[in-house]
Image (cartoon, rainbow, N blue to C red):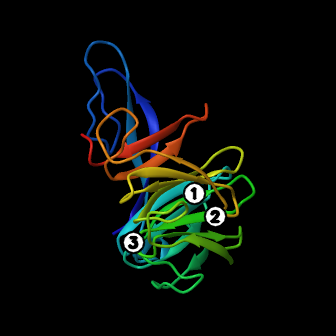
Amino acid sequence: IALAACINGTTDAGLSSPGSDVPSPHDGSSTSAFVETAVWDTDSVGVSFAAPNGLTVDDDGNVFSTEFQGGHLRKFTPEGGVVFEVAGNGTEPGMLSNPIGVAVAGDGAIYVSESGSHRVSRFGPDGSFESSWGGQGADAGRFQSAMGIAVSADGEVFVADFGNHRVQVFDGTGTYAREWGQEGSATGDFDNPIGLQIGPDGNVWVVDSGNE
């Protein structure tokens, strides 16, 4: 199991980019195609991944990944060098239990959502453990499997709360701010939200796995 890096390039009409299965149109136009440029695995970067899941990139191009089975958080340079690794699948503070999502704030703080421990853990820019919050439950600030996670431009932390069918919002230290959503299929409802991202305009995009 590996991480693959791709670039988004434009291909000429009637041609396909090397390594791409995406054909170009034959009508004289061009198309955009993703081309694999690197694979990070045991042979290339000396890391063996156990069900890699979450992935994000900071403003400097550093890559952060989580491992669902291995319980690891890793930071890589843009070239694939390992900067640090938070190891161990467990529930003790500083360990990770089935981590899903990872997000990096503007100040360098790293947030990891854990489905196994139903919590969010915060690490410093150097990978040192700082705090965690949550726990299993339906009350405000608790989770039924914390899944996707994102940080807004002003430092608020958004978390997809899978089993409680909602999105919860916290400040950067974990203080509960607000939430929205309930189980259902109507506009504004969720059915097992699993992923989310925040656009440059501040809009929140949610992957709602149960509502097709």
Of residue 171 and residue 198, the one placed in the foreground of this image is 171
Secondary-structure class at tag 1: strand
Determine if residue 19 is in view: yes
Check disc 3 and give the amino acid type. Phe
Secondary-structure class at tag 2: strand
Secondary-structure class at tag 3: loop
View extreme (front): residue: 139
Of residue 183 and residue 162, the one placed in the foreground of this image is 183
Of residue 19 and residue 168, the one placed in the foreground of this image is 168
Check disc 1 and give the amino acid type. Ala
Residue behind mark 3: 68
Image point (39%, 57%), residue name? 164
Q: In which quarter of the image is the N terminus?
A: bottom left
In percent of width and height, residue 134 lies at: 54, 69
**If you read the primary sequence from the N terminus, does the residue marked by circle 2 or circle 3 appear first?**
3
Residue behind mark 2: 110
> Is residue 100 shown above or below 46?
above
Disc assigned to residue 31: none
Check disc 2 and give the amino acid type. Ile
**Which quadrant of the figure has residue 24?**
top left
> Is residue 133 shown above or below 206?
below
How far apart marks 1 and 2 lie (CA) works out to 6 Å
Mark 2: give few (<14), some (14-19) or many (20+) Cα within 10 Å. Answer: many
